[in-house]
Amino acid sequence: MREKIKHLLIEIDSFTTNSVEELESFRIKMLGKKGEVTILFDDFKGVELSIKKEIGQLLNELKTKTQQKISDLKELTESSREVNKNFADLTLPSQSVSIGSRHPLSLVKNEIIDIFSRIGFTVSDGPEIEDDWHNFSALNFPDEHPARDMQDTFFIEEKIALRTHTSSVQVRIMENSKPPIRTISPGRVYRNEAISARAHCFFHQVEGLYIDKNVSFADLKQTLLYFAKEMFGADTKIRLRPSYFPFTEPSAEMDISCPFCSGKGCNICKGSGWVEILGCGMVDPAVLDNCKIDSKQYSGFAFGMGVERITMLKYQINDLRLFSENDVRFLNQFKTEI
Ligand code: DAH
């Protein structure tokens, strides 16, 4: 029995673990109903009287040692659990951080800015809540013009509305600076329209304005041709159709050769080979005078384009609503763009 106790003492001394499960099976192995230490106590009954005292002491020592060992190890495993709770496991694979993507409208707006800055245009902006003068009157809209109607314009109070176009920024720039002026104004605009695949109550425009001495329609045409080629590719052709805007004279609408069929005719361009992308013209002398620029000395051109329209053509998007729904399945597709 002495031998057995000695062996068990060695085993108990050398035992170590930091696992709660292992410690529990050790406890059962030693102190359980059929545990090795417990069994020794059962065997003790049969020990010879002469050595009973000595063996009894040894057995008691063995039991306290075992209990001590178990409680020490228990403390250790619990404190190491605490540590694990507070510190991240550095061996775990890291969680991937998902990187967002730029909105397609921002991509295209930035590209437009980039193209025009290369030929000396600055970027300017103005307020989205605009007064009647900057949005309409200074731009030559007659009082009875339908665009001023409640049905088209979101009025905030009498003569204060959400701007219906970025042409209002033209007026602010001309009022506040002296020619030569060469600027583009990107921004959001609002119109009271029912939301559908082809219309929305807010969208984005980029306005362009160039005022100097001797600015001609040829300058306008050449600037827009440069833009169309940069935006849609070097083979792009443009055509200008006569049109009407209150603030330009003459006015035109510009088409580009259809980027999908290269002008051959497809269902996007409805077989015509051309798609409209912007409105433009020579700034009406009355508008220059409204903005305190001498129309006898200066002339200029202006143009305005819808960013959604350009984006839809560039990325073959066929529903305006996709731009404002923030569906990540749509937005994620622009991840690879800059
Ligand atoms: N403001 C016009 C619109 O919202 C677009 C436009 C047309 C702007 C001709 C211009 C321009 O500067 O010259 O439809």
Image: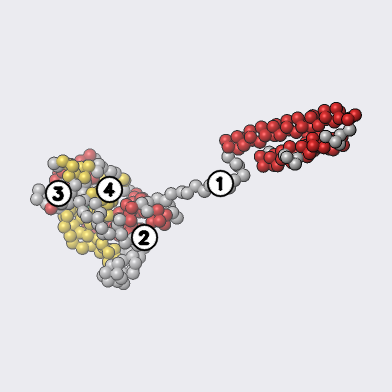
The tag earlier along the polypeptide, 3 or 2, is 3
Question: What residue appears at the point 21 percent right and 54 percent down from the top-left corner?
Answer: 193
Dot 4 amino acid type: Arg
Q: Is residue 297 visible?
A: no
Question: How many numbered marks, from 0 up?
Answer: 4
Dot 3 amino acid type: Met
The tag earlier along the polypeptide, 1 or 4, is 1
Q: Residue 94 carries which label?
A: 1
Camera-near label (3 vs 4) is: 3
Res 34 quadrant in image = top right
What is the CA distance from the residue labelled 3 to the residue labelled 2? Answer: 34 Å
Query: Would residue 214 appear left or right of 56 to someone viewing this image?
Result: left
Are the residues at dot 3 and dot 4 in contact (C-beta closer than 8 Å)?
no
Dot 2 amino acid type: Tyr
Query: Would residue 25 appear left or right of 93 to someone viewing this image?
Result: right
The tag earlier along the polypeptide, 3 or 4, is 3
Say which of 13 and 112 sits in front. 13
The local secondary structure at tag 1 comes to loop
Q: Which mark is residue 81?
A: none
Question: What residue appears at the point 28 percent right and 51 percent down from the top-left corner?
Answer: 204
Say which of 103 and 120 sits in front. 103
What is the CA distance from the residue labelled 4 to the residue labelled 2? Answer: 20 Å
Q: Which mark is residue 150?
A: 3
Are the residues at dot 3 and dot 2 in contact (C-beta closer than 8 Å)?
no
Query: Would residue 90 appear left or right of 257 to someone viewing this image?
Result: right
Q: Which mark is residue 315?
A: 2
The tag earlier along the polypeptide, 4 or 2, is 4
